Image (cartoon, rainbow, N blue to C red):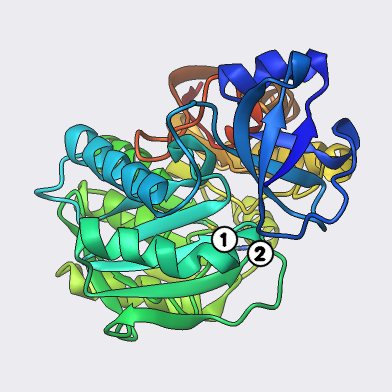
Amino acid sequence: MATVVVPDRLTSHVAAGHPWLYVNAVPAIPGARTGEFVTLLGQGRRPIGQALFDADSPIALRVLSTRKDETPGPALWHRRVDQALSLRRSVLDLRHTDCFRLLHGEGDRLPGVVVDHYAGFLVLKLDTPAWLPHLEQLCDALEHHVRPRGIFFKGISGEPEPARNLRGDAPPEHILVREHGMRLAVDVRRGQKTGLFLDQRENRALVRQVARDRRVLNLFSYTGGFSLAAALGGATQVTSVDLARGAVDGARHNFSANDLDPTAHSFVTADAFEHLAACAAARELFDLVIVDPPSFAPRKQALRAAEAAYTKLNAAAIRQVRPGGLVACASCSSHVPMDLFLQILRESARTARRALRVLEIRQEPADHPTPLHFPEGRYLKFVLALAE
Ligand code: SAH
């Protein structure tokens, strides 16, 4: 097996659980190919861990283990899947929820592997082609521990790798799942990410809890998760806005699937910024506005522009909240840490000339764990506030 000497300043990070080594931070590994295992060496060439090599990514090495008694391969994948499943069983209420993240990459010590569970179907997504040579072994471990109806491969982030069924039944066009009892149709092939934004589950539950008797505006509504939660929580009327027609149609269908009359609510295919401008022009106010945009800063270089866009969006959203009403603002960019997001919201509130009182601040739920020493892995911010 190839080896690499980890610089002294990084060995304590690896030992503490940081899962990445950047290509610029480690010596070249001559002859190593993408997908090979590499032994990490510390001071005195003492082994300190095992990693998965990627020849083309800035993240050259993803740490698989730092334990002497673990070697990469089928037995380790089995152990990781088993532990991940036990964790979900112990922290989630799986009586009313049958969709959850089973493997959250780095947080489950299978860095670069994401597996979501949708009512018995597994959807697998990779961050790196380095896992491709081990895909069948991963599927063996998943089949053994989860006994899924099927395993569907959604591809590799940023690569042209085609989606395909790997094991068992191919998923139906729509998998009907339950989240805290709420029914949602998931299109794993055409949907975003693996089909559903599972990371907002507990925040949707919070919206359900506070929505009673409110008129609600849900911006970037996708297939209507927050909208449904609000309507089921007793909102008087919910407007869902998304740029993607298919998502808006999906939201309408999801209302029907939950015995809610879609004609009592609004479903708008539009740009959220333009829709807010139209609401402002019409002086239309809401009792709860939800803002859950896609990442405006997919890369660190885009951060400045993203800050300005988040501020503009949240300021416009806050303006449309009736005095004393609620606003729920989210960001899923890992390049915007919580402190910066709160600063953006302060600036947004100042621009809108409104004072915000924070009711809840949340991050990823328990099926999206992150090592404490891996702040880069934390990406979700969700703030519920009262707009005076
Ligand atoms: N809140 C959703 C997830 C939102 S994902 C949930 O809980 O499921 C972000 C959504 O924003 C996507 O559906 C995408 O189609 C939409 N989108 C992207 N840019 C947009 C824009 N400018 N205006 C409105 N929607 C937009």
Residue 196 location, x and y as percent?
41, 61
207 sits left or right of 31 in the view:
left
The answer to which image quadrant residue 145 occupies is bottom left
User: Considering only vertical position in the picture, is 273 above or below 335?
Assistant: below
Label 2–label 1 contact, CB within 8 A: yes
Residue 178 seen in the figure: no
| Residue, disc 1 | 126
Query: Which residue is nearer to you in this view: 57 or 346?
Result: 57
How many marks the image carries: the answer is 2
Q: Amino acid at mark 2?
A: Pro
Query: What residue is rendered at 76% in x and 15% in y?
Result: 44
Give the quarter the ligand 1 occupies.
bottom right
Could you say whether the residue bearing mark 2 is in a helix, strand or loop? helix
Residue 99 location, x and y as percent?
27, 57
The answer to which image quadrant residue 92 occupies is top left
User: Considering only vertical position in the picture, is 301 above or below 118?
Assistant: above
Query: Which residue is nearer to you in this view: 181 or 118?
Result: 118
Which dot, 2 or 1, sits closer to the camera?
A: 2
Task: Report, in whole angstroms, how far the alpha carbon at label 2 lies from the one at label 1.
Answer: 7 Å
Query: What residue is rendered at 54% in x and 37% in y?
Result: 380
Name the outermost residue toward the left. Answer: 95
Could you say whether the residue bearing mark 1 is in a helix, strand or loop? strand
Residue 323 location, x and y as percent?
48, 29
Residue 284 seen in the figure: yes
193 sits left or right of 139 in the view:
right
Residue 4 location, x and y as percent?
78, 35
| Residue, disc 2 | 129
Query: What residue is rendered at 40% in x and 79% in y?
Result: 166
